[in-house]
Amino acid sequence: MKTRKLHNITVSEIGMGCMGFSHGYGEIPPEDYAVDAIRKAHDFGCTFFDTAEIYGPNLSEPGHNELIVGRAVEDFRDKITLATKFFIKGEEVKKDGSVLGTITRHLEASLKRLRTDYADIYYLHRISPDVRVEDIAEAMNALISRKIIRGWGLSMVNAEILERANKICHLAAVQNIYSVMDRDYEKAVIPFCLKNDIGFVAFSPTASGYLSGKVKASAKFEGDDVRKWVPQMKSENITANQPLIDLLKVFAERKHATNTQIGLAWMLKKYPHVVPIPGSKNQERILENLAACNVILSDDEFRELEEALKGIKIHGSRKDVGMPQEFID
Ligand SMILES: NC(=O)c1ccc[n+]([C@@H]2O[C@H](COP(=O)([O-])OP(=O)(O)OC[C@H]3O[C@@H](n4cnc5c(N)ncnc54)[C@H](OP(=O)(O)O)[C@@H]3O)[C@@H](O)[C@H]2O)c1
């Protein structure tokens, strides 16, 4: 697979989101199946794996996903880019004595689970209301110089926060939601990253599977499944967004590809610094998504798709729920 740069870090142009093996999309598969899936993705050419300390079947079992990823990649760890994430609270910093102390404690626990002594990208999962992003950036400088991380990132942030953080420690990547259905970050964050040599890692790039065209209006989601609250997955929006599915299908048929692959190929064509990390707990769909690297839209095809997209209204937006307004451009 071709590679892209997230600032100084080289990754396959499509990465793998591992969250679904532990959390977020319903029943989780057996651990051996998940480990095998990650190894098959690597055999296919994927060298970029995304996890987080928080991904577990419940909050009392954090680290579940990191344990799976660590086991899966142990034999080829030095050939891949491993990204994980942490949360931080002001009360922890008080107890530990410093922001650096708290982050180091989280990082060391993650590294142990990941069976490695460094993380390639370490993201702050969400901005904390009581820990300044400047203080996080300072701590990241220290961790980079100690070589415990190679680069750092922020997740679900706006351009103003990015600018403040990037002044103190250059970011390798920003990880925000982005797909053909969720394009808000095209306004400020993606251009900011492009201008400042920061990679943009797109999470939920298949719009939680909606782009496949296989989600039925009658679909029911249970337990910790995020699709219970994703507005695009509300029955009325599944129906109302059908014109998008129809459009993707036209291109999919023309390119002998799947709808989801067109959605991923579109963002690869649109920006040189965007790297999607689709998530699936199904081995066939993981390979389908990675194979989007072989679906190349020509300049004319891309323009035609962009033009057609302008005429399609998206019903339901992730920014309408669960995300404070200040984090949205
Ligand atoms: N930074 C953050 O706050 C944040 C938030 C969310 C996620 N993430 C990261 O980003 C990764 C990707 O996000 P995501 O999991 O929401 O991505 P996604 O690919 O948009 O959504 C995953 C869902 O789509 C389905 N799907 C994926 N490919 C499909 C295909 N080809 N055909 C049909 N259905 C398909 C999956 O179903 P099956 O499993 O049944 O295939 C799963 O239900 C996560 O794994 C995680 O590492 C980060």
Image (cartoon, grey):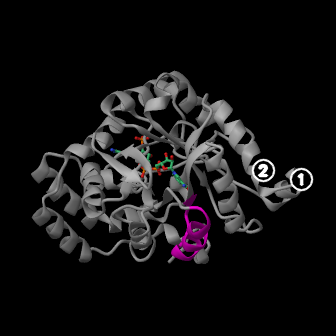
**Label 1: which secondary element:** helix
Whether tag 1 and tag 2 are in contact, CB under 8 A, the answer is yes
Would residue 77 be visible to someone looking at this image? yes
Q: Amino acid at mark 2?
A: Thr
In the drawing, what numbered circle is on residue 102?
2
- Residue 83: horizontal and vertical position, in percent? 53, 44
Q: Residues within 10 Å of mark 2 (few under 14, many from 20)?
A: many
Three-letter code, disc 1 = Lys
Question: Residue 262 in the image: x percent, y percent?
Answer: 24, 54
Q: Residues within 10 Å of mark 1 (few under 14, many from 20)?
A: few
Residue 175 in the image: above or below residue 145: below
Specify whether 273 is left or right of 266. right
Tell whether position 155 is magenta.
yes
State the residue position of label 1: 95
Q: Residue at x 37, y 27 (%)?
A: 40
Can you tell which mark lies on residue 77?
A: none
21, above or below 146, in the image: above
Spot occupied by residue 317 in the image (x, y as percentages of width and height): 46, 70
| Residue 90 occupies quadrant | bottom right
**Which range of residues does the magenta coloring cover?**
154-169
- Seen at 58% across and 41% down, the residue is 119
Name the residue located 27 percent from the left edge and 43 percent from the top edge: 2
Q: Is residue 21 above or below residue 134?
A: above
Give me the residue at 61% from left, 30% from top.
Answer: 67
Residue 294 forms part of the magenta stretch: no
Nearest to N terminus: mark 1 or mark 2: 1
